[in-house]
Image (cartoon, helix red, strand yellow):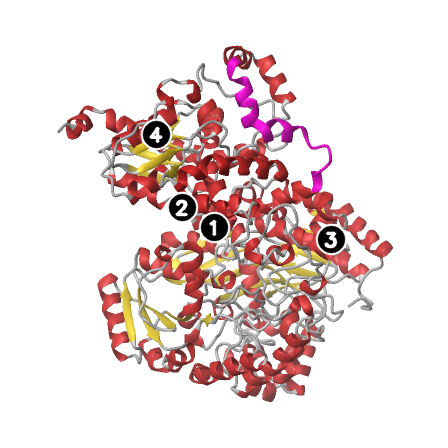
Amino acid sequence: MADDPKLPTEAFAEAFVDALRGHLGDIVDSSSLTRAIYSTDASNYRIVPQAVLTPRSTNDVITAVRIARAHGVPITVRGGGTSCAGNAVGPGLVIDFSHFMNRVLSVDPDSSTAVVQPGAVLSTLQNAALPFGLRFGPDPSTATRCTIGGMIGNNACGPHGLSYGRTADNVVSMTWLTGRGDVITAGSGNDTLAVVPGLDSFVSENLAVLRTEFGRFGRQISGYSLEHLLPENGRNLAAALTGTEGSCGILLEATVRLVTRAPAPALAVLGYSDMATAADDVPNLLPFHPLALEGLDAQLVDVVRRAHGSASVPTLPAGGGWLIAEVGGAGSEEAVEAARKLVASSGSADAVVLPAGPEATRLWQIRADGAGLAGRTADGKQAWPGWEDSAVPPERLGDYLRGLEALMAEEDVSGLAYGHFGDGCVHVRIDFPLDAGSTLMRRFLERAAALAAEHGGSLSGEHGDGRARSELLPAMYSPQALRAMETFKALLDPEDLMNPGVVVRPAPLDADLRRPQALTLRATDGFAFAHDGGDITDAVHRCVGVGKCRADLREQGGFMCPSYTATRDEKDSTRGRARMLQEMLNGGVVTRGWSSPEVHDALDLCLSCKACANDCPTGIDMAMFKSETLHQTYKGRLRPLSHYTLGRLPQWLRLAAPLAPLLNLAGRIPLLSRAMTTMMGADPRRSLPTLPRTPFRWRKRSRTAREQAGGPKVLLWVDSFSDAINPDIPQDALDVLSAVGCDVEIAGPGACCGLTLVSTGQLTAAKAKLRRTLDLLIPHVRDGRTVVGIEPSCIATLRSDLVELLPDDPRAAELSRSVKTIAEFVTSIGWAPPRAAEKLLVQPHCHHYAVMGYDADQALLEAMGCDVEISAGCCGLAGNFGMEKGHYEVSAKIAQDGIIAKASTSPDRRILADGFSCRTQVHDLADLDSRHLVQIIAEALRSPTAAQRQRP
């Protein structure tokens, strides 16, 4: 695309950006950081824009388009950036509607409609419609972050497109800005075509081709949906513009149709020998009118089991592939009965019926995470979009799948299939070797396009053509149909400034690919990146852009990504950071490698919470990348002050212990406290912790092992923070383990996980610290002791970072397997805990949630009789992050929107927070006390009723 005359020269681009900024101010961003992040979406493509606009109003958009037209600059519109086909990247101006123009303006239950701005996220609309028993019908798996504008751009469908139709079927009218600069109202009816000069004549002149080549089956999404312009189809311009992928203008506002929400649908899960056999059964099930009918490959479920354990997957029938039929009814019993009737008429070898509830929800979550989970093949290779959403008439689906499988075998590629089988739509990402070039991808896509056309299908069943498939449209359309699409676009965008290269006059499908441009970067003296064979380039490309990190934590219930929830800035999402690291490997915009200012800006607000390693379906670990970046940038160089203070805090705490009274006095004097925090590189608004007179290691009682012959052998590992700041907690842990009947020994001083060194990227020192810890703990492990820790972040470090930092030391994996939390340990031996009927608001530590999971703790608390409410999301302090200068506001906002807001609405609940950071944050910002789990258990053990129970 370098020879495209519409691409501005550097001077011309600067004049364009100056003109934009002169009229629109700071909502125009042409920084290298922002241009790099917006250079790609969820596709294979990379095109660096000249500027990014985040408009606040329709007038901002109209002004920007006027200026772009005057300068001849192309325009690409973007919503959630989840486009898989390269629909949302372009060389000129990118307009991101998701930041400001993202509201649901109204919901009218009488007409079952809603008015929305283009950047409104689908789940926001669903929540607004919920009180009226309504919903928007189409629901892509990216519902928590995809926007209505993006759905209209691609004519999205989702699982419930089977029952509620495509987005085109659910749009009533639109306020639309054409490429000419005109604002029109697009609706339906005899007069609607008159708003576009020449459109009525165009329809009259092309009746034959519009009737024969467009709208042949429901999932014919490729190309423009010009059949909606026909008189017998209501002359529906709104529907015809839906699916034009931003190539015919810009949506400014939409009125959409809502449908009645099914009250309690059940799932019929049907097992088959393979996916093609499952597809053969689809026509037999459609007469039962399921709300959704999804296909799921067994290998995809195996990926989930390997990543998150068998408990994350509900009970499934035997088989190599499944159909998941969602069946409605007036209530749960009626829905279950209808599901059983569907099962009885199916050709499945085995089946289960799941009523609405947790099991069904878990299965839907696996299906929703499909795009990310399928980003790796069964043998762990990176898989790519490009042929990820082809569709054929449902009656042809089984044969099409067999043909597709044969084609993949011939080309020696693979992928994990799933999709909307009731509509004939197949999702599969394929392990094209893009790091070696794109020749195989081109050949495969050309052959696959011919195969889909042979079965009367569409190259795209819901994602649009974008840069991935527009060049292939001649495989399914005649020259006359292609000319009709060109003419239609010209009526609305005669200068071809709206998303050029898409659908009409397409760019080559193998131009502007991101992965082939990336330099290969191997792991060296930092983390091993073992899951990716030591290839950092492969590791960072785990992020395929599904954007789950942009979802509202309150809706998805996870912990990712806390800083993005506070700023709503793309650079602060896990995806934005991954894109920046990818750009670092691509060069051109980000040019100084690990030391690039753009990389450090993007990573600055990463809390290193590790939630992405658990919540992101691709398993990317941004905490590891941040640590590696700091390590590679600063090794052998002067570091930021906070690395020497907060990054080496365990060392300073040990030295400070004899001076505790003096330091505590200084901490109570505001002037001295501010001076001390400033000297540490911390924010002066932070308070200093109160140090105990006697650390745990100095307590006489703590030095005595509690040996009980025949009891489980335990090594109580007291971390630096518990020892030096909260010694009562390890004392309670010792009492609890004694009450359990354990043979307890206490780890000697010096067994440190090195977490503060890891989080500040001091990896050489961290490795030395971890080797010392191995020397101290492994003899106990080999003596048969389970290492029971207290601080979740420290336990998580030995469970995860240890093996990544010392992969060649077999003791690392040995210790990692032997470290447990208190809850994991006592539940694993079947201990019956004391009763404690407390109402608790629980703040799980992020590392606890991400690495160990909180299930054992929740089960233990419930066994004690506690009423538990979990606060989703990070506390915002995250070790050194919230203490450092420049992070206070974001840290505080995360807490105020999360645990502190929860505490204010649940004043009768006491806070449980195992993490030192979490306890510090709620006390620092809200003067709220909180306790560790072992304190709650110990208090229950000391109660009179517990004492009576324990008497012989």
* Mark toward the viewer: 1 or 3: 1
The residue shown at (47%, 46%) is 553
Q: Which residue is mark 4?
A: 733
Q: Amino acid at mark 1?
A: Asn
- Report if residue 137 lies within the magenta region: no
Image: 159 above or below 9: below
The residues colored magenta run: 633-658
Q: Residue furthest right?
A: 11
Q: Contact, CB < 8 Å: mark 1 with mark 2? A: yes
Label 3 packing within 10 angstroms: few (<14), some (14-19), many (20+): many
Q: Amino acid at mark 4?
A: Ala
**Within the image, what quadrant is residue 765 found in?**
top right
Marks 4 and 2, how far apart at CA: 20 Å
Q: Amino acid at mark 2?
A: Gly
Image: 397 above or below 181: below
Q: Which residue is mark 1?
A: 614
Q: Earlier in the sequence, mark 1 or mark 2?
A: 1
* Mark toward the viewer: 4 or 2: 4
**Within the image, what quadrant is residue 943 found in?**
top left
Q: Which residue is mark 2?
A: 853
Q: Please indicate, yes or no, whether residue 610 appears anywhere in the rendered image.
A: no
